[in-house]
Amino acid sequence: MAQTKRIGILTAGGDSPGLNAAIRGVGKTALGFYGMEIVGFRDGFRGIVEDRRLKLDRATLAGILTVGGTILGTSRDKPHRMTIDGRVHDMTSVIVKNYGRYGLDALVCLGGGGTQKNALRLTEAGLNVISLPKTIDNDVAMTDSTIGFATALDIATETIDRLHSTAHSHHRIIVTEIMGHRAGWLTLGAGIAGGADVILIPEIPYDVHKIAEAIRRRSRAGTNFSIVAVAEGAMSKEDARPYNIAEARKEKARNQREKHEAKLELAALDARHTGNTLRLAKQLEELTRLESRVTILGYVQRGGIPSPADRLLATRLGSACGDLIHENVFGVMVASRGDRTEPVPLERVAGRRKIVPPDHPWVEAARRVGTCLGD
Ligand code: F6P
């Protein structure tokens, strides 16, 4: 008789609504449908290093479909660069050893872009790894969508709806900052759905004078308020230039030292970018003479109960993950493709970010309805 499979599962990176629905999807399929055993690791990859195990049984998996966050906890720890007692260590070999010690046949990693890279590293270290894509940023390559995006889109859209009435009453500009450092999917989607007058995303650097002109045009036409939806990582054309140079330097680095230097440069530019939304609102106030206010959505976008769309996506991806483990398919991410799911080799996902193409249909639609994209 074939031996019972034992699988491990962890959530890593920033949390997002729908993670528990995905844990439940994988767990119920593995446990209930295939009769496997499943053990959770708390706090991302650190959980395997520090033996933070949580046995997942029917009782633990019950009632979590609608719960926000992750019952396993999460962290941004990387297997190859983990801080232990104040010092950074490569813990890959410890993870490999513990995987064996715990008698695992597979490890399921739920995470965003960083987690996909770490999943590939562990695959290359010889483990049977399978991953699921989650992040409110929707920027994981090779999948139509990621767990958490739909809920965050609902939250950000509802916020824009609410800001409309107050902006209208006070004849103000309200600049609302939406999450997304490198990808503008959330801001673009919520901006379109919420009818923002200006949408600024990292992929399309902006000219503040063009934004001011669009707002002044609205005023001349008798509308004395505007909603500006700005992604965390949106930048002016001037700020984008040094950033792009540093990014290219990182991409073309010939050795670790050059890569490290480019990363330091990017980190310094990121630090300088902090507070950009406040500066932008002030500039717009000066240029348009309309009172401006700022609303930063922040972590509210990642909290609370997942939307039905995310529960559905998480359950589809989670159950497909259980099927793939049963079929011994590893080294892949379970991607969403239309109504179907598809295993995509981790090599094709890791290190690639899905950003908004400048000619994407959402961008075109926004332009058609008269939204200013700042360019
Ligand atoms: O990746 C999801 C995300 O919420 C981004 O939109 C945001 O830039 C980042 O995480 C914030 O990271 P942290 O949780 O580490 O503050």
Image: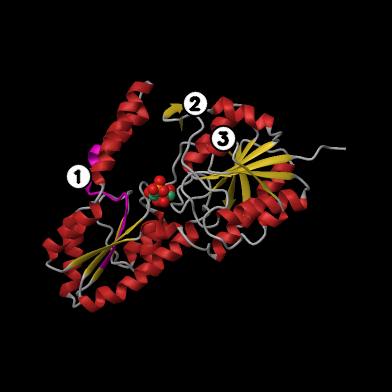
Is residue 267 visible in the rendered image? The answer is yes
Between tags 2 and 1, which lies in front?
A: 2
Residue that badge 2 annotates: 90
Upstream in the sequence, badge 3 or badge 2?
A: 3
| Up/down of 159 relative to 45, above or below | below
The residues tagged by marks 3 and 1 sit, at their Cα atoms, a distance apart of 45 Å
Please tell me how crowded label 2 is: few (under 14), some (14-19), or many (20+) other residues with Cα within 10 Å. Answer: some
Residue tagged 1: 238
Q: What stretch of residues is rendered in magenta?
A: 227-242
User: Does residue 283 appear left or right of residue 107 in this picture?
Assistant: left
Q: Secondary structure at mark 2?
A: loop
Q: Relative to 49, say whether 206 is above or below.
A: below
Q: Position of residue 348 (x, y in %)?
A: 53, 37
Amino acid carrying mark 2 in the image? Asp
The vertical placement of 310 against 334, above or below, is below
Which numbered dot is residue 50? 3
The answer to whether one can see residue 357 in this image is no
Q: Is mark 2 within 8 Å of ligand 1?
A: no
How far is the residue under mark 3 from the one under mark 2?
Answer: 14 Å
Local crowd size for mark 3, using a 10 Å CA cut-off: few (<14), some (14–19), many (≥20)? some
Residue 372 relative to residue 359: left or right = left
Q: Nearer the viewer, residue 195 or 26?
A: 26
Most foreground residue, 188 or 23: 23
In the image, which is nearer the foreground, mark 3 or mark 1? 3
- Residue 199's disc is none
Q: Mark 1, residues whose alpha carbon is within 10 Å: few (<14), some, or many (≥20)?
A: few
